[in-house]
Amino acid sequence: MNSVERKAVSTLALIYALRMFGLFMVLPVLALYAEDYQGATGFLLGMAMGAYGLTQAIFQIPFGIFSDRLGRKPVLIAGLLIFAAGSVLAAVSDNIWGLIAGRALQGAGAIASTLMALLTDLTREESRTKAMASVGASIGLSFSVAMVVGPAIGGHMGLTGLFILTGTLSCLAVLLVMFVVPTPVRQTRAAESGAFWKHMGGILRDTQLLRLSAGIFILHTVMVACFVVVPKALVNDGLPKSEHWHIYLPIMLIAFIIMVPFIIVAEKRQRMKEVMFIAVSLLLAAISILGVSHGLYGLILGLGVFFIAFNILEASLPSLVSKFAPAGYKGAAMGFYSTCQFSGAFVGGALGGITAQHLGADKVFWVVLPLVVLWLVLVATMARPKHLTSYMLEVKVDNTAQSEQLVGKLMAVAGVCEAVVMQEVQTAYLKVDPKVFDPKNLNLIESGI
């Protein structure tokens, strides 16, 4: 990456990390401190946990559309300010309904699609994979840090202090957008990131993409449902609220260390399916351990296995979506994937809350267990992904016939496995085998480019 790209990627990764840090930080403590709020019940605590997921799922695509029309940075700033407003509302609320409203307002600042679109505007195609990986790594790091920092700060400042901090971080992100993030010379409404609805039919017919989207839905359903009851279980087993970070810190460090070789094997040795199967099996084992545990050490063991599985899956799934998405469909596929992810957070909060209230906290693990079993079946029957890379080039076509003719020529080039020509944006999207493909061979195509 050149200097402009490095500045853009590092700043946008930091902005996304600050945004997600604010959401993740309350995850391990909200169920503990919110139970003292006026009107709190098990179900409403779960709703407070997952409310942000519902509004994230609803507003993610509209924010992306608005950014195409109004510009990336204004929409990004608006989303961050909405998140800050939600943080303030949650901080000043003393009843559970105000807390739910604040969490929902936080989620309504759905900036992920806009941020990724801005990242696309500021990077070249050949740098984009590294750019997306950098943002993904920042999210993983923010999650790990938040799981440790949240309980530590919550023990001294309570939920009010946590929400004030999240709002402050969001305002800091606004300043970064205004004064540090480069302004794109031109805004590219690429077909990959813009044609969500146009490509929905193809995505819903693609059984591999549906498996992955179902997987991220289940993963976040299980995570949020479990954290409706896990913090309280730790307290009941003798660990004070303010000391929960003593457990999360070593667990997250160990989980991160173990995750790295799995990801290397998955990517470098092309064993994505096997690593996915192992990770989902570990998740199944973790939920089973948490379900039968009746002491602190059992909970710690279950959480350790859970976060090893979670980190591997959270890092692997976006890469798999990119690999399975047909040429030209990657943006739409990631949009659907993200919607499923946030929907899972909402369902997990509601499911965990209502189960804890009516059946008991220990039953939450057994209620979500069948979902993990279903996911294991989906992974076992998943096709083995092809390890192809994306390639984009500008073209010049005037009608459908020329587009089809050009696709035929592109597919004849050695190493090109998929080719889609988008006439409306004068762009061809290719998926190529990097071991065979040589861009110089495209020069043999005399017409249409």
Image: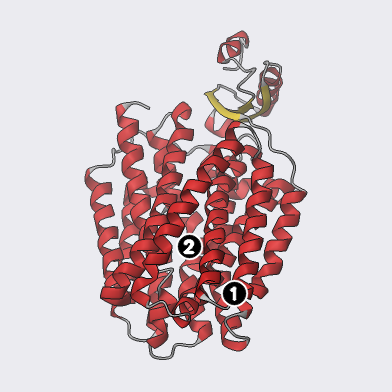
**Residue extending farthest bottom:** 39
Q: Is residue 293 above or below residue 380?
A: below
> Could you tell me the amino acid type at mark 2?
Gln
Residue shown at the point (37%, 62%) measured from the top left: 148
Which residue was labeled with disc 1?
A: 293
The quarter of the rendered structure image containing the C terminus is top right
Residue 174, picture quadrant? bottom left
Drawn side of residue 126 relative to residue 369, left or right: left
In this view, the residue in front, 258 or 87, is 258
SS at mark 2?
Answer: helix
> Could you tell me the amino acid type at mark 1?
Ser
Q: Where in the figure is residue 158, as x and y percent of width and height? A: 30, 76
Crowding around mark 1 (Cα neighbors within 10 Å: few <14, some 14 to 19, many 20+) is some
Q: Where in the figure is residue 293, as x and y percent of width and height? A: 59, 74
- Of the numbered discs 1 and 2, the one sitting upstream in the chain is 2
In the picture, the disc for residue 56 is 2
Whether residue 247 is visible, yes or no, is: yes
Crowding around mark 2 (Cα neighbors within 10 Å: few <14, some 14 to 19, many 20+) is many
SS at mark 1?
Answer: loop
In this view, the residue in front, 269 or 246, is 246
As measured in the structure, the alpha-carbon distance from the residue carrying label 1 to the one carrying label 2 is: 34 Å
